[in-house]
Amino acid sequence: MADLFGLEQQPKRTNDRPESAALVEVLKALRAHPAVVWCERMNSGAARVGNRFIRFGFTGCPDVLGQLTDGRLLGVEVKSPTGKLRPEQSLFLERVRGAGGVAFMARDLRDVLRELNQLDRTGSKHD
């Protein structure tokens, strides 16, 4: 298929991957939540560029990194309804929590709200 200028058009991409749809929903929820100052999608993985193999991100890097209004680090690993954390992802989330940050796995908006709404005024989680 060609456009008006005779250039080949790429077919529109469809978002038929459940994790991609979850990521969009989770990012919207995080960006709208009053406890979150900022959050960004972290691209990780690898690609071959010419003769080179390039890695993006780092092992265990969560899908979303951000900061809460109280200054703490926020790490969110997004999974599809059936997705599971890899050991290196679990380890990273544990490290963030161990250092006083907030880190969790989210499959949708409800997970984000559940995790962030249980933060009290002092910034700690209710038990």
Image: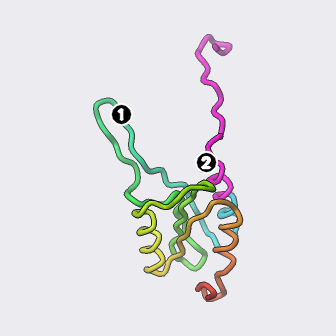
Taking the spot 41% from the left edge, 69% from the top edge, the residue there is: 91
Element type at mark 2: helix
Taking the spot 68% from the left edge, 58% from the top edge, the residue there is: 28
- Please indicate whether residue 40 sits to the left or right of residue 111 in the image: left
Q: Earlier in the sequence, mark 2 or mark 1?
A: 2
Query: What is the x, y in percent for residue 102?
Result: 54, 75
48 drawn magenta: no
Determine crowd level at label 1: few under 14, some 14-19, many 20+ residues with C-alpha closer than 10 A.
Answer: few
The image's mark for residue 20 is: 2
Outermost residue to the front: 82
Q: Which residue is mark 1?
A: 49
Mark 2: amino acid: Ser
Mark 1: amino acid: Val
- Please indicate whether residue 113 sits to the left or right of residue 85 in the image: right
Is 122 or 127 nearer to us in this picture?
A: 127
Q: Is residue 61 above or below residue 35?
A: above
Q: Nearer the viewer, mark 2 or mark 1?
A: 2
Outermost residue to the top: 6
Element type at mark 1: strand
Q: Is residue 79 above or below residue 72?
A: above
Quadrant in which the C terminus is drawn: bottom right
When asked about the image quadrant of residue 31, the answer is bottom right
Q: Tell me where the magenta segment starts and ends, as one range.
A: 1-27
